[in-house]
Amino acid sequence: MFENLTERLSHTLKKVSAQAKLDEDNIKESLREVRMALLEADVALPVVKEFVDAVKARAVGQEVMSSLSPGQVFIKIVQAELEHVLGDANDALNLAVQPPAVVLLAGLQGAGKTTTVAKLARWLKESQKKSVMVVSVDVYRPAAIQQLETLAGEVGVDFFPSHGDQKPVAIAEAAISQAKIKFNDVVIVDTAGRLHIDDDMMHEIKALHGAIKPVETLFVVDAMTGQDAANTAKAFNDALPLTGVVLTKADADSRGGAALSVRSITGKPIKFLGVGEKTQALEPFYPDRIASRILGMGDVLSLIEEAEQKLDKKKAEKLAKKIKKGKRFDLEDFRDQLQQMTNMGGVASMLDKLPGMGNMAQMAQQQIDNKVFVQMEAIINSMTPAERRNPEILNGSRKRRITRGSGTQVQDLNRLIKQHKQMQKMMKKMTRKGGMANMMRGLGGMMPPGGGGMPRM
């Protein structure tokens, strides 16, 4: 996420931090590079100007000049101003109303609005322990209603049915009435999108907003559209009293222009980031953590929170006890580890949150296809319990049966067995002194020369 911007800013700030003394000239030169990095990241020009002026005002003053470590102070100023541009603090959803709290999602077609409804419903259910109902008022696209019904079933929330011959306001009001009867805490309303902003669309959504009076009105926008995302959000904000923005496809956005422009241009906070296609791929937006990631300092807090929420602690403890007793790390254990890694968003997502690992995350994204984890799981599922516990019994005929059952090739199975053996060795190292360091070395050993991981399929 934001790899290009991270690389440019990290390089510039590294040069600054090496300076024993900072004066007005080298500060000006560094800020010129920062300015170019932001413009190349498609950050809106007024935002870039305001940011550079704010850093300059603080850096040229006594704050940096009189410091014993001027380079470090300069970096802290850049980080603080970056946080300010992004919004200073996390702006949580305001659900402190008499239930059901109504959340309205608006946006252009193709921004990922319907998927975001499901992601938000799942986040509210799992993280906030809320009972959620979702409803679609997109009467122009029956497929959108069907898609939301499928997603609601997947994430385990209530779905209110609607049809193309109904009026959007009538659908939403009926859903809210039903939610009161079912004692739902939150109702999320998915609205119709358009390929562009038009008067009919705005009139319809204004009427809907006036009728149901949502406590939160969130604008969903594709982060990859750069500063256009901020301009579109502003157009919606002029028509609707938005309370926040959800940036989708942030994991694929290597520039970061949208994230850095939206808050300044609209005055509305970014509340969530969509960081993948799966329904669990939604993160609350923390400006300080994102600023830290942009500057290549990682985001360990988010990684810890994610691990606490998504990793199965009982399985982890059971595996640790098993290894300590000297028992083997078998293929069933390996399958559990693959599932845990997938739940955490894959290798690239985890590396992206570790300090100084942004480039590694980018390489992992390019060289490791996460679909390989699904394939490896399918291979293990095609084995008998005895084969999973003792892979040494896998002979030619067993391998042919397993690969036929999983739709793979024998070389895929052989590769899996090799990687399982590497993982076995790593697990043994983890039980000795300096387990974490040994684990990282073990992970490095699984990567072939050149930084690649598991080969693409």
Image (cartoon, rainbow, N blue to C red):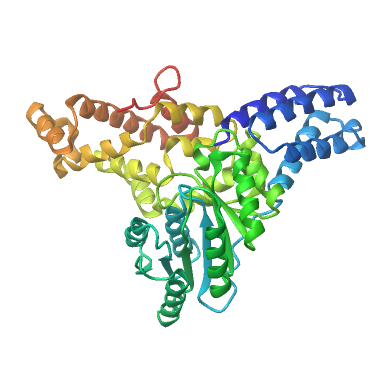
**Residue placed at 53% from the left, 66% from the top?**
103
Q: Give the left or right position of residue 122, taking residue 382 as reference.
A: right
Q: Which residue occupies the foreground of this view, 12 or 452?
A: 12
Q: Give the left or right position of residue 77, taking residue 351 as reference.
A: right
* On screen, residue 420 above or below 102: above
Residue 4, percent from left and from top: 59, 29
Residue 277, percent from left and from top: 41, 45
Q: Which residue occupies the foreground of this view, 206 or 299?
A: 206
Quadrant where the N terminus is found in the figure: top right
Residue 30, percent from left and from top: 78, 25
Q: Which residue occupies the foreground of this view, 111 or 393?
A: 111
Find the residue positioned furthest to the top.
449
Quadrant where the C terminus is found in the figure: top left
Q: Give the left or right position of residue 338, taking residue 281 as reference.
A: left
* On screen, residue 89 above or below 376: below
The answer, for residue 77, to whether it is visible in the render is no
Res 206 → quadrant: bottom right
* On screen, residue 271 above or below 169: above
Find the residue positioned furthest to the front.
199
Q: Give the left or right position of residue 25, taking residue 284 as reference.
A: right
